Image (tube, coloured by chain):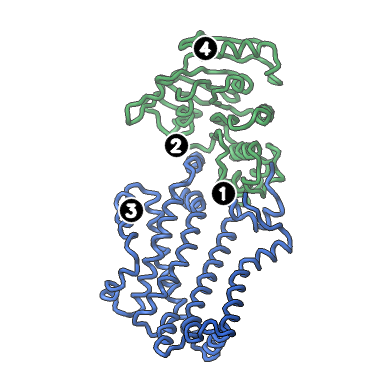
Chain colours: A blue, B green
Amino acid sequence: MVRGFSSGRRGRLKRTLVPWLVPALLLAFWQVSSMLGWIPTRILPAPTAIALAGLQLARSGELWTHLSVSAARAGGGFLIGASLGLFFGVLNGLLRRAELLLDSSFQMLRNIPPLAMIPLVILWFGIGEEARVFLVSLGVFFPVYLNTFNGIRSIDPGLLEMGRVYGLSNWKIITDIVLPGAMPSILVGVRFSLGIAWIILIVGEQIAANSGIGYLAMNAREFMQTDIIVFSILLYALLGKFSDALARKLEFRLLPWHPNFQRLSKEFRARPALS
Amino acid sequence: MLLLEGVAKSFRNGFTALKAIDLRIDAGERVAIVGSSGCGKSTLLRLVAGLAAPSTGRVLLNGEPVLRPNPAVGFIYQEPRLMPWLRVRDNVGFALRGRAAERREPVRSALRRVGLEEYASFYPKQLSGGMAQRVAIARALAPAPKLILLDEPFSALDAIKRADLQNHFLRLWESEKLSTLLVTHDVEEAIVLADRILVMHPGPGRISAELRVELPLEDRRQARGFADLKQQLLDSLRHDEAPTLVAHG
């Protein structure tokens, strides 16, 4: 049995603070080790030095420029990849013929790591924005596709029959039963693919880019600015965490009925399940 | 009200589920079909609901052939089949057409009739099995159907909840005067809920006996004649062909 924190103010505070305990302890250990000279600053600067480097980048405006470029690439790639994943997931999930025609091709493509496509992508798109957006889209497509497909296929056939009993059109069955029923699975795909978008972008931005967080890190490498390199890496981690938190918020917003999201749902707290 | 004439149903793989079914249900009549699993009871309900077409014969509802699902026919399944993402009121309103404001009153009325008005904003996961099944009943009642089809509606519940819901059901039917067609393998349930019981046998599904229940509606299980009736029904289920039976209370 999984034991959790009690509800109420103290419980909520604990739930907010506990996940930050390990990172805070690691940071403290890192800082102390740097101050005592156990870790040479050339290899890994102290957290305070990294924070300072970040602050300088923020003050100069450089950080916001690179951050917005990276966010636009990740967002654009995510939107394209997730939309296509959703479309083909719904299509193949609903139509056996479409599944027969397309699914095995998608499964073959899925097993090619997107980063292995880099040489080909450079030949196709050059070293411009399109290449990076394409790589992100490719990486995002499959988690959304697979989870949408599986979500649709795992809908209770009894609910679909219920829709037919009450004379719902095919379109209404899709919008009122299929999509809401597959939503928990679709959102798992969205959450997973948001993480992938940033991972692919890290590599994508280190290849012949002249802006973005990856470029910031690669440029810092040329000048041996370890603090900026580490700051860029930490920035990716924070952006990934931020995206994940957004996706999680979306899950709580869209799935208040789902047992997995009842713990924090106000309504379910107010009205516990009846026996 | 409902008329089935020489209805048969065969599937593409050559399996014949139903053969030469003739059945008539008048307005306000409660009919039960009893048979073992796989005898074609549920297929028969699907034909009446317009979810499948007969291979031969005709299904007529108020003189009109049933070609597709009809709002005048409500369907209650063994499991509630509620949409987990919809609140109770939206699940009940699911069967209704029109704008939200137009649906509000029929939904409220249907929930009131099953005693769940105050649970309108709950999600199905917050309800017990019996309550969820009552929501399913409310959903079937909301469009004011003329005929209700019940496919083993209480078999997933424990004995006490089942008896409670059966009684609730009877009171409801008594006040609404609806026609019902119940399929079940529970002979007691058939005797409690129906005025007329048809026995179905498999291979292919056909009606082999008919039994009229003339026991008082209240507390039929305790009525004199209930045990005899149950035994007669069980006997006719065991034997392929049974004579037409009439039971008196």
Which circle's residue, 4 or 1, is located before the other in the chain?
A: 1
Contact (CB < 8 A) between labels 4 and 1? no
Left-right relation of B21 to B94: left
* Inter-mark Cα distance, 2 to 1: 20 Å
Mark 4 belongs to chain = B
Q: Which residue is mark 2?
A: B68
- Please rate how many residues cluster around mark 1, counting C-alpha atoms within 10 Å: few if below 14, some from 14 to 19, many from 20: few
Foreground mark, 4 or 3?
3
Q: Which residue is mark 4?
A: B236
What label does residue A161 carry, if any? none
Marks 4 and 1 sit apart, C-alpha to C-alpha, by: 47 Å
Q: Amino acid at mark 1?
A: Gly
Q: Which residue is mark 1?
A: B98
| Residue matched to label 3 | A103
Task: Please tell me which residue is depicted at 55% across the width and 29% down the height of the picture.
Answer: B152
Q: Nearer the viewer, residue A257 or B174?
A: A257
Q: Considering the numbered disc 1 on the image, is that residue within a helix, a strand or a loop?
A: loop
Q: Is residue A137 above or below residue A252?
A: below
> The disc labelled 3 sits on which kind of residue?
Asp
Q: Chain of mark 2?
A: B
* Mark 2 / mark 1, whichever is N-terminal: 2
Identify the mark nearer the N-term, 2 or 4: 2
